[in-house]
Amino acid sequence: MGAGPPKESGGPQLRGLGAGGGLAALRGLLARPLASYYLLLSSSGLLLLIGLTMVFSATSVLDFATGGNATESLTKQAIFAVIGVVAFWVCQRLPVRTFRGVAWPALGVALVLLLLLNSLTVLQSLAGIDGIGPIRANLHWLHLGPVQLQPSEVAKFALVLWGADVIARKGAKLGWWRELATPLFPVVGLLFVLVGYGDLGTMLCLLALVVGLLWAAGVRLRVFATLTAIGLLGVGLLVAVASLGAGAGERGAENYRLLRLTMFIDPPPLDKCKLEDCHQMVQARYAIENGGWFGTGLGKGSLKWGELPAAENDFIFAVIAEELGVVGCGVVVVLFAVLAYTGLRIAGRMTDPFRRLAAASATAWLTGQAMINIGGVLGLLPLTGVPLPFISDGGSALVVTLAAIGMLASFARAEPDAARALHARPPARWVRLVWAPLPPLPSRRRPGAPSASRARAPEGRHGDDQTAPRAVRANRARRGSAKERRR
């Protein structure tokens, strides 16, 4: 009898070995010293490239129909992208002492711009005054002559730097809630009022930023519960003032913020939805339905031709859903997930408290804003009108976002393993001049020596031991039990 074909053996084992080998290779890549740096650059760079592509796709037809130039919006966005890349390059080269040094001036500039914007907005609604000289206000934008900017975007980055600097200086004293009450909470509350008066969605992004900041600082859960209650009360007040002309509202007109909230809680049937009430929501659903799994093709979407409001800004994710389908949306979501993982990885590896706090708060800001935008487009969250980071059309937001990525890149190069690897094999001098200087080497501490951020809180300031942090109370209990055993 002839021998039959040899039987395959170990098929499942080989397949399992291949999967295990892939996971091992992924762990090996993530264990490399500069893995955080390259993950940050690749995810943010791909998001920026997708953003420029989708801005061109969402605006080219209307730009050509209205002005005869299909690349008008793309050219403006590309110019801001170049400015943002320069801001990224500058922030990547700055040492940590510079970030801490500009924290207070940046916060002061943001507060002045917000006060100026809100003052002009109130004057416009009450007295019909459009501006003072070359300074004009247009909803969320402030025009300083030929320069147009969005003060709330400046406030986000300023709050990251200032909040991280304030909390890092307090150190172990954060165990007492009174230390948070001055000056963090008053300034944060003022920013919330100034930003939320005209833009409730951006105020929610600031809230996500503050939550990330306090979480990285190790603040107790009771503080988060108190902040949640105060935040819900503040959101209710900001929703109510829309009837007085706040934001895009008009005095005596229907409260558009309350309308958006009620539309989310109790949406009407799509076939009975009024044009002015939930038009955006309906068109976004149609775009998602038209796209299906793989989309209609890049540039072949039709709802962006005037049916979908703000297709290049707040609802650009709906354009992605229509033209690139579920697969394209999944790619964007995965890139934001990689960005979130990388930012938290950088924060977890920092020994300097300021770097840890700034990295965590910036990551919470960017990923929280992306979640708010995507959730609003998909109908999972109320509509708030915030742009999608890296992707939506808008100059101020893109420049500030890339500057924050530059700060994270500077921190990624300062990770202990990354700094040692860069000093072990330093690049050529011209590379350091063009790209970024060498980060400082991490300080050598004695094994088991506590860091400055984990220092024990001073005893005797308050008689109640329950006001001290949990770690301090545990250390005191262990010392007491050791003394009893020696007795």
Image (cartoon, rainbow, N blue to C red):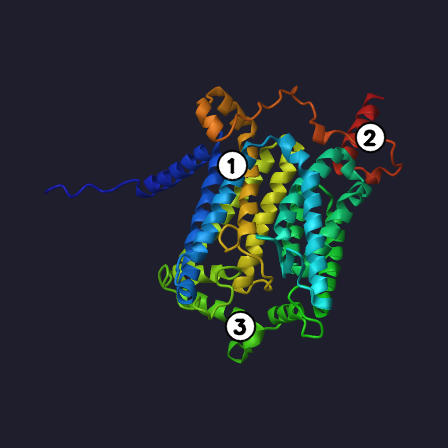
What is the spatial separation of the Cα atoms under label 2 and label 1, in whole angstroms? 41 Å
Question: Vertically, is 31 above or below 305?
Answer: above
Mark whose residue sits in front, 2 or 1: 1
Q: Nearer the viewer, residue 460 or 113?
A: 113
- Label 3 secondary element: helix
- In this rendering, does residue 459 appear at all? yes
What is the spatial separation of the Cα atoms under label 3 and label 1, in whole angstroms? 41 Å
The disc, 3 or 1, on the residue closer to the chain's N-terminal end is: 1
Q: Nearer the viewer, residue 324 or 398?
A: 398
Query: Contact, CB < 8 Å: mark 2 with mark 1?
Result: no
The image quarter containing residue 176 is: top right
| Mark 3 lies on residue | 279
Residue 422 % position (x, y): 49, 24
The disc, 2 or 3, on the residue closer to the chain's N-terminal end is: 3
- Position of residue 10 in the picture relative to residue 432 (left or right): left
| Mark 1 lies on residue | 89
Answer few, some or many: residues within 10 Å of disc 2's Cα (few below 14, many 20 plus, some between 14 and 19): few
Tag count = 3
Residue 319 % position (x, y): 44, 62
| Mark 2 lies on residue | 458
Answer few, some or many: residues within 10 Å of disc 1's Cα (few below 14, many 20 plus, some between 14 and 19): many
Residue 218: which numbered mark, if any?
none
The image quarter containing residue 101 is: top right
- Label 2 secondary element: loop
Q: Residue at x 69, y 23 (%)?
A: 449
- Label 1 secondary element: helix
Amino acid type, callout 1: Trp
